[in-house]
Amino acid sequence: MKIQFKNVVKRIVPNALALIFSTLLLIFGTISLKAHEKPDNPSQMDKIEQFKKMKMLDYLNLSEENSEKFLVKYTQMTKKIKEKKKEVDESAKALNQSLKDKKKDEISSKTDAMMQKQQEMMELIKDMQKQIRSVLNEEEFARYLLFERNFNSEVRRMVQKNLRENHNRNRD
């Protein structure tokens, strides 16, 4: 029986790529969980963001020209959204402190300030979607929306699965 090299490669390469992807997803998922424990660690968050961009580009399967346009808009807008999220978080801390200190005269104004920051963040997200839609066709944009919706939960699910498997192995 003669085994052809092309047939072997066709069978092995997809399995190897799936294994590599799964391993990377687990590694970055673990980093993601640690990053949530220490949200001020920029290097871990940067690694996760780079991994996300890599997977997103792979999933969207864009041309080189569209990949560049997409990445420019995506990076600019995610930076703005992160800055606005920090503002929302700061306003939430201020509101929480007013509640703890029972400063009833501040609660209303701090509630309004937090709601305003949240509204501004939602507007940035809408603007990001409009800008990204302008460089993608409808199918690519649909895949982008689904990727964004599913990425974090998929990483979280895989990390939880990995943690359960490790826990079960350690128990045995």
Image: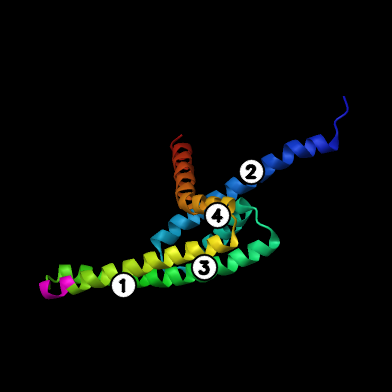
4 or 3: mark nearer the eye: 4
Mark-to-mark CA distance, 4 and 3: 29 Å
Q: Is residue 164 magenta?
A: no
Q: Which residue in the protein does label 3 denote?
A: 43
Q: Quadrant of residue 89?
A: bottom left
4 or 2: mark nearer the eye: 4
Earlier residue among tags 4 and 2: 2
Q: Which residue in the protein does label 2 denote?
A: 18
| Secondary structure type for disc 4 | helix
Q: In this view, does 168 lie to the left or right of 144?
A: left
Mark-to-mark CA distance, 4 and 1: 32 Å
Query: Which amino acid, by three-letter code, is at mark 4?
Result: Phe
Residue 93, percent from left and from top: 26, 70
Q: Which residue in the protein does label 4 denote?
A: 141
Mark-to-mark CA distance, 4 and 2: 24 Å
Q: In this view, does 59 lie to the left or right of 169?
A: right
Reply above or below: 105 against 150. below
Between 117 and 31, the one nearer to me in the picture = 117
- Residues shaded magenta: 104-108
Residue 95, percent from left and from top: 22, 70
Query: Which amino acid, by three-letter code, is at mark 2?
Result: Ala
